[in-house]
Image (cartoon, grey):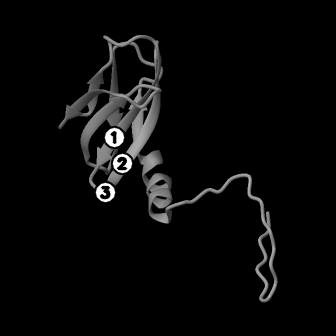
Amino acid sequence: MKLTIMRNTIRTIILNSIQFFDNTNVKLEETNVDRINVSPNPATNKVTVSSNDLIIENLSLFNQQGQLLKEAYHTSEMDISNFSPGIYFLQIKIQDGVVTKKIIKI
């Protein structure tokens, strides 16, 4: 959609949706998301987070409803063996932000 603003003119504009983007967060995801690997994915017992150059501070596991299920500090592994099969989100805190990866528990 193109939005044109003209002086001394009244226009009615109906928007179906508005999206706002924080350039800082977009840049963070573009630069860091590919530098972090989570394996195996799909997983049955545990997932391991690895990166050649980023320091992993902590891991947080969330379900699809956004509920925090588990946290792990000062480690790059998380045991998921007690969780039901499904889709989860692993939030990885690094020194300059947060990256979230989808993991599948089988």
Residue 83 position within the rendered picture, expressed as x and y whole percent measured from the top left: 36, 13
Q: Amino acid at mark 1?
A: Ile
In the image, is 64 to the left or to the right of 90? right
In the image, is 32 to the left or to the right of 56? right
Figure label count:
3
- Separation of marks 2 and 3 at Cα, in angstroms: 7 Å
- Separation of marks 1 and 2 at Cα, in angstroms: 6 Å
In the image, which disc is placed on residue 92? 1
Residue 19 position within the rendered picture, expressed as x and y whole percent measured from the top left: 61, 56
- Separation of marks 1 and 3 at Cα, in angstroms: 11 Å
* Residue located at (25% from left, 30% from top): 71
In the image, is 34 to the left or to the right of 53? right
Quadrant location of residue 15?
Answer: bottom right
Decide: marks 2, 3 in contact (CB < 8 A)?
no
Residue 9 position within the rendered picture, expressed as x and y whole percent measured from the top left: 82, 83
Decide: marks 1, 3 in contact (CB < 8 A)?
no
Quadrant location of residue 77?
Answer: top left
- Where is 17 relative to 106, above or below? below
* Residue assigned mark 2: 98
